[in-house]
Amino acid sequence: MEKITFRSSIIAFYIKGEISAEQNFVRFKIPNRLGLIPLGSNEERIPVTQISLVRMTHSISLFWFAVGAFVTFMAFVNFFLSVFNELPFFKSALSVLLLLLSIAFLVCSLRKCLDIDLTSGRVMRITFIIFEWHKARLAADLINDLISNRIDDTNVRIHTDRSIGDNREQTDRIVDAIKGIENKLK
């Protein structure tokens, strides 16, 4: 059972979600939060037979991008005003902190999404921070492997071909044994 732990925000880095495989089910634990406050999580166990498509997408949160751009602009203005007016150090330090926060907002606006289409028509979207795109790919590969294994388990042709192959090997062994006995009797 493989478990993939991910973060959906850089600012709230301590809030984590997870995706894991449990036999014929995929378990999703998606965190809920209000800003920086964790509000528990939504947990779902979805049968592999109910998943019809897994795809990766990129998205940008326009709200957080706009907030980050605005705070970046204000931080630069504050920094240049404090440098040119020779204000105390804490004002320039405040503008540097604002700049770091604005960069975090800009990075948070860039997301990698794992979209999972279900046979019911519902689409689950799980967002990953852009730095954890490899975990999104790993989760997609895990789910696709589960789907592939499930299809192989329920594919009658594969099992029939396997039975025919096994029977052919047994028949060949019996024929070889009979030929060996005939050669000893001669």
Image (spheres, rainbow, N blue to C red):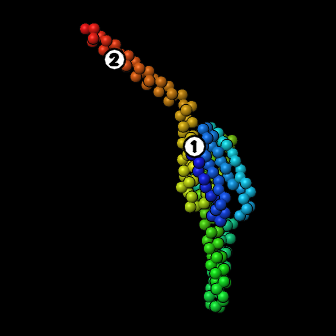
Alpha carbons under labels 1 and 2: distance apart: 44 Å
- Above or below 26: residue 113: below
Numbered disc 1: secondary structure: loop
Q: How many marks?
A: 2
Residue 80's quadrant in the figure?
bottom right
Depth check: give the residue in front, 7 or 53.
7
* Quadrant into which the N terminus falls: top right
Depth check: give the residue in front, 46 or 73.
46
Q: Which residue is mark 2?
A: 176
Estimate how packed mark 1 is, as few (under 14), some (14 to 19) or many (20 or more) residues with alpha carbons within 10 Å.
Answer: few
Q: Is residue 164 left or right of residue 97?
A: left
Numbered disc 2: secondary structure: helix
Residue name at image x 67 percent, y 52 percent: 30
Q: What's the residue type where badge 1 is placed? A: Met
Q: Which residue is mark 1?
A: 1
Dot placed on the residue nearer the N-terminal end, 1 or 2: 1
Residue name at image x 67 percent, y 50 percent: 29
Q: Nearer the viewer, mark 1 or mark 2?
A: 1
Residue name at image x 62 percent, y 58 percent: 7
Q: Residue furthest top?
A: 185
* Quadrant into which the C terminus falls: top left
Estimate how packed mark 2 is, as few (under 14), some (14 to 19) or many (20 or more) residues with alpha carbons within 10 Å.
Answer: few
The reply to whether residue 53 is visible in this rendering is no
